[in-house]
Amino acid sequence: MAKIHSVLVGKAVRHVARLRGGSGSALPGLVVEKIDKRFVENALKKLPRGVVIISGTNGKTTTTKIVVELLESQGLKVFTNKTGSNFSRGIAAALLADMNARGKLKADIAVLEMDEAHGVRFAEKIRPRYSLLLNVMRDQLDRFGEIDHTARLLQRIAESTTYGVIVNRDDPRLSNEKFLRDIEVDIYSYGVSSELINQFPSDDDMRTLSMEKREKLFERDDTCLKTISGKTATIAYGGKTEKVSLKLGGIYNVLNAVGAIALCRQILGKNMDEKKMLKTLSKITPAFGRGEDILVNGKTCQIILVKNPSGFRLGLKSFKPDGVSTMIAINDNYADGRDMSWLWDVDFDSLKAEGVCEISGSRAYDMALRLQYDEVNFTHVNTNLSRSLKSFLSAEPDKPKRIYCTYTAMLEVRKQLGKIAEVKELG
């Protein structure tokens, strides 16, 4: 009875939050967890295929989206935290959205992206069957501290996993013997070929020219990105090589897809319909704000999330600036990380030829100063994101638009664009 009561209260809070214009992604979960501290645990422990955790610095939201769509293509009913709210209260809110009034969750498996720090506590309670660990990069240093601490958080998630752990073998902090030695379940890997390794630098590789493959620790199984040309990728797994055309933009999203395949192979085993999996993969589009295209005034406006040096570098490398009007929006709210010094580890030379049309966000002037040091011209600087976006959209009307933005800036940009264009709802 107490469970049903908490579900009804949570659903009511969610309904009110949405009526007031919010997505209701966290508040209902916070309320229901106050009523029932084991709400999430009790809801997930009955799933026949258990829980999967996807964690790491970059790529959690997109990789989770890919995994969910691949598993659904195989006939599984998947519960996920689709808004990307990866704290426990966000997962509780997502459960409320998918449950009926009696607290019944119709799902075979849960695939959840988890914040590294919150993922530890979650994994120790829920004990996932599988975990996919993507990478370790400098990100929100004010929250996580240095990257060795982040690696330890991911290690604890792996140690709580009960069936299998899939790691990015090209990340030195996930592929060393110290990280792997206390993991008692089977370890699988994914990565890229020697020919591509220079396109996917780890955090350490930003400060050294030495980039080595790290395959020798992984003899059990491996999923590998062999080649990439535009949006066509060649992926090797299980003794075979497959070529697939992708709608996912950005080389980092292609690597996320490789990690997703590695995970799904372990979840599904020999029951996986590979043709159906590859066909589904070819149709998957980026997650919100991760290379997402929105049609505004007849022109494409592309939104690219940037939140650390590696992500920004790969974004600039993946999306050529030729013939595109560019805006950069940098906030320093809690969800972005307060320390913006990481901007100085990003090379902005690729923007020199076209320049930057608009700079905005609470740290707009920090961004402007950074561009000046790389001799990148810019037209306007305005900390008011709403006004800045309007100015950006009206300038250079014949050009497609591209906006690089931190997390909270991305949410605000999507909200403002939603007033004048069709923007997919996060929930």
Image: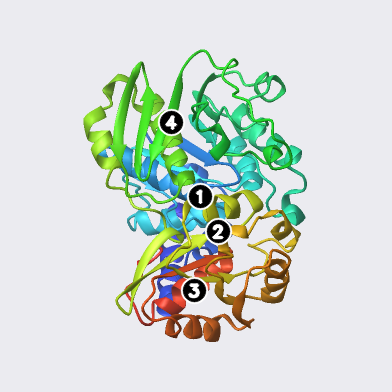
Left or right: where does residue 359 sit relative to residue 81? right
Mark 4 / mark 2, whichever is N-terminal:
2
Work out whether mark 3 precedes mark 1 in sequence or the reverse, and give the earlier one: 1
Q: CA distance from mark 3 to mark 2?
A: 34 Å
Classify 10 Å Cα crowding around label 3: few (below 14), some (14-19), many (20 and above).
some
**Measured Cα–Cα span from mark 3 to mark 1:** 33 Å
Residue underneath mark 4: 225
Mark 2 is surrounded, within 10 Å at the Cα level, by few (under 14), some (14 to 19) or many (20 or more) other residues, namely some
The relative height of residue 283 versus residue 367 in the rendered view (above or below) is above
Callout 4: SS? strand
Check disc 2 and report the residue beneath it.
35
In this rendering, the label closer to the viewer, 3 or 4: 4
Q: Earlier in the sequence, mark 3 or mark 2?
A: 2
Circle on res. 39: 1
Image depth: mark 4 or mark 2 in front: 4
Q: CA distance from mark 4 to mark 2?
A: 46 Å
From mark 2 to mark 1, how far is it between C-alphas? 8 Å
Q: Nearer the viewer, mark 4 or mark 1?
A: 4
Q: Which mark is residue 260?
A: none
Q: Residues within 10 Å of mark 4 (few under 14, many from 20)?
A: many
Q: Is residue 167 left or right of residue 427?
A: right
Type of amino acid at the residue the image marks with label 4: Leu
* First of labels 3, 4 by sequence position: 4
Cβ–Cβ under 8 Å for marks 2 and 1:
yes
Is residue 165 among the parts visible in the rendering?
yes
Distance from Cα at disc 4 to Cα at disc 1: 39 Å
Residue 38 x, y percent position in the rendering:
55, 47
User: Cβ–Cβ below 8 Å for labels 4 and 1?
Assistant: no
Q: Is residue 74 visible?
A: no
Left/right of residue 46 with respect to residue 196 in the rendered view: left
